[in-house]
């Protein structure tokens, strides 16, 4: 009976030891699993954080690109504005030049038309059988004078053009000579050159020469 009790106590002790060992093993496994889960959670958190950083960088990059695009758009708009302004200035300059050319072309045409009408009138007197001889002589002299004046005007305008002035028109009224130059301003030495040309070709005094710009 005593032996049985002793064996029973030994069995209880062994069972208790097994239970203790099982509990300790379970506790360690639980801790290890918790550590693994914690580690996985931390790794997941790190991945999310890296993902967030990547997204933030991308957004920042997009913002930079957007800002650059806006700057490029501003530059393009500024370029377009400058181009439009330049084109407007060029258009105004072209229109101004065209208007100036029209003035000189029209003035020369009107002048030549006047000379043609005068020549036609004197030729009628010259060819009329009813004209007196003295009238025919006067008509002949006037025709020669008009032709000489036209020739001198043509030479003068061509010489003025060689001085750098694109357009000019000359009007002769008796002894007075008016010269219109296509320029905003004329230097004193250029005025002297024009006066010398007119005085020599049209055989008039410098004080009778009047120069203006158009």
Image (cartoon, rainbow, N blue to C red):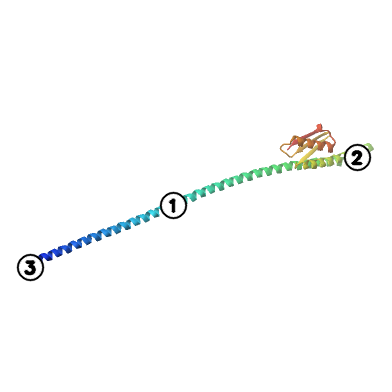
Q: Residue 94 appears at what percent x and percent y? A: 68, 44
| Relative depth, front residue between 130 and 11 | 11
Q: Residue 145 appears at what percent x and percent y? A: 87, 38
Taking the spot 64% from the left edge, 43% from the top edge, the residue there is 89
For disc 3, the marked residue is 4
* Mark nearer the viewer, 2 or 3: 3
Label 1 CA crowd tier, 10 Å (few <14, some 14–19, many 20+) = few
| Relative depth, front residue between 115 and 175 | 175
- Asked if residue 97 shows in the view, the reply is yes
Taking the spot 24% from the left edge, 60% from the top edge, the residue there is 28
Assess whether mark 3 and mark 1 are in contact (beta carbons under 8 angstroms): no
Q: Residue 88 appears at what percent x and percent y? A: 63, 44
Label 2 CA crowd tier, 10 Å (few <14, some 14–19, many 20+) = some
* Mark nearer the viewer, 1 or 3: 3
Give the Cα distance between marks 1 and 2. 98 Å
Lateral position of residue 101 relative to residue 121, left or right: left
| Relative depth, front residue between 201 and 55 | 55
Q: Quadrant of residue 15?
A: bottom left
Q: Secondary structure at mark 2?
A: helix
Q: Residue 86 appears at what percent x and percent y? A: 63, 44
For disc 1, the marked residue is 57
Give the Cα distance between marks 1 and 3. 78 Å
- Asked if residue 113 shows in the view, the reply is no
Assess whether mark 3 and mark 2 are in contact (beta carbons under 8 angstroms): no
Lateral position of residue 37 relative to residue 179, left or right: left
* Mark nearer the viewer, 1 or 2: 1
Above or below, 55 relative to 3: above
For disc 2, the marked residue is 140
Q: Secondary structure at mark 1?
A: helix
């Amino acid at each position: 009976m005593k032996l049985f009790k002793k064996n029973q106590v030994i069995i209880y002790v062994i069972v208790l030891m097994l239970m203790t060992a099982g509990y300790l093993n379970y506790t360690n496994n639980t801790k290890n699993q918790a550590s693994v889960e914690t580690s996985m959670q931390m790794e997941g958190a790190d991945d999310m954080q890296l993902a967030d950083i990547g997204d933030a960088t991308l957004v920042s990059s997009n913002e930079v690109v957007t800002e650059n695009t806006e700057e490029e758009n501003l530059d393009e708009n500024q370029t377009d504005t400058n181009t439009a302004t330049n084109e407007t200035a060029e258009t105004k300059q072209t229109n101004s030049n065209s208007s100036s050319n029209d003035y000189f072309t029209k003035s020369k045409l009107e002048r030549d038309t006047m000379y043609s009408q005068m020549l036609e009138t004197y030729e009628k007197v010259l060819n009329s059988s009813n004209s007196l001889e003295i009238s025919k002589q006067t008509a002949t002299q006037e025709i020669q004078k008009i032709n000489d004046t036209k020739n001198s005007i043509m030479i003068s305008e061509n010489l003025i053009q060689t001085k750098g002035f694109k357009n000019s028109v000359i009007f002769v009224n008796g002894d007075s000579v008016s010269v219109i130059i296509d320029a905003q301003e004329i230097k004193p030495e250029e005025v002297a050159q024009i006066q010398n040309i007119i005085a020599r070709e049209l055989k008039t005094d410098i004080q009778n020469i009047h120069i203006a710009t158009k």
